[in-house]
Amino acid sequence: MSDTDKKIVIAVDGFSSCGKSTFAKAIAAKLGYIFIDTGAMYRAVTLYALEKGAVSADGVDTDKVCALLDEISISFVFNPSRGASDVYVNGRCVEDKIRTIEVSSLVSPVSAIPEVRRRLVAMQQEMGRERGVVMDGRDIGTTVFPDAELKIYMTADPRVRAQRRYDELTAKGHNVTLEEIERNVVERDHADMTREVSPLRKADDAVVLDNSHMTVEEQMTWFLEKLNEVKTR
Ligand code: DC
């Protein structure tokens, strides 16, 4: 295998709803790599905790959430009709359930629990052990794979991001307003950047991609240039 064929880890971190998953999925498909949406894992834990009464709109019971961790098994199963993997909890597909505004508004406090992060980070490191993965999240380049060969930090204007998430949810028939989505986006940015354990932050060696006014094709062109720089360095 030549050096340019060597499989690498690509970390895609950044703010919520800035198209990380769409971008990460596209580059994984282009390279024949596995795509792992780590946000879906935090959402899956949140959904399970919600169903078991360990979290609610009134707050998060950290001890109860931690006690549930041993009974949660998370897996990804490829769904050919979506061309992407669906997330499963204990063998049940929860792909749609984890995207609701209810889960979105509770996922930040759940993902701030150190024990939740410890477990999920260990799972993510195992998933990427053989490299050849594109992982999207908040702490991939800083904590999960600090040795990732290519680290991308994505950002976009909060209004653009809220509009994108709004379009996505209403297309799926969810009854939401643009204002509540924008509020949720801004609140999650703040919570993700200020939490104590692994806050969202750009790794020193990450390259920034602001895609506020970029098409998917333009982002792909940008990515291929960066990949070429990494492979020939
Ligand atoms: O990418 P997303 O919006 O689906 O992520 C949902 C939440 O999970 C987000 O608010 C922060 C958290 N998260 C995290 O803390 N670390 C990750 N690696 C991925 C997501």
Image: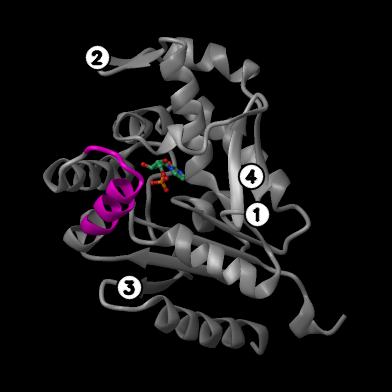
Q: Which residue is mark 4?
A: 124
* Residue 213 versus residue 38 in the image, above or below: below
Badges 1 and 4: C-beta atoms under 8 Å apart? no
Picture quadrant of ligand 1: top left
| Cα distance in 3D space between marks 3 and 1 | 27 Å
Left/right of residue 78 with respect to residue 204 in the rendered view: right
Q: Secondary structure at mark 2?
A: loop
Q: Residue at x 44, y 51 (%)?
A: 138
> Where does residue 193 sit, x and y in percent of width and height?
30, 47
* Residue 92 versus residue 120 in the image, above or below: above
Looking at the rendered structure, the kind of residue marked 2 is: Asp
Q: Residues within 10 Å of mark 4 (few under 14, many from 20)?
A: some
| Cα distance in 3D space between marks 1 and 4 | 23 Å
Q: Residue at x 55, y 14 (%)?
A: 68
Left/right of residue 226 with respect to residue 158 in the rendered view: right
Left/right of residue 108 with respect to residue 97 in the rendered view: left
| Cα distance in 3D space between marks 1 and 2 | 38 Å
Magenta region, main secondary structure: helix
| Cα distance in 3D space between marks 3 and 4 | 26 Å
Badges 3 and 1: C-beta atoms under 8 Å apart? no
Q: Which residues are magenta?
A: 163-175
Q: Residues within 10 Å of mark 1 (few under 14, many from 20)?
A: few
Is ligand 1 within 8 Å of the beta carbon of the residue shown at mark 4? yes
| Cα distance in 3D space between marks 3 and 2 | 35 Å
> Where does residue 7 sit, x and y in percent of width and height?
75, 70
65 or 142: nearer the eye?
A: 65
Q: Which residue is mark 2?
A: 58
Q: Which residue is mark 1?
A: 80
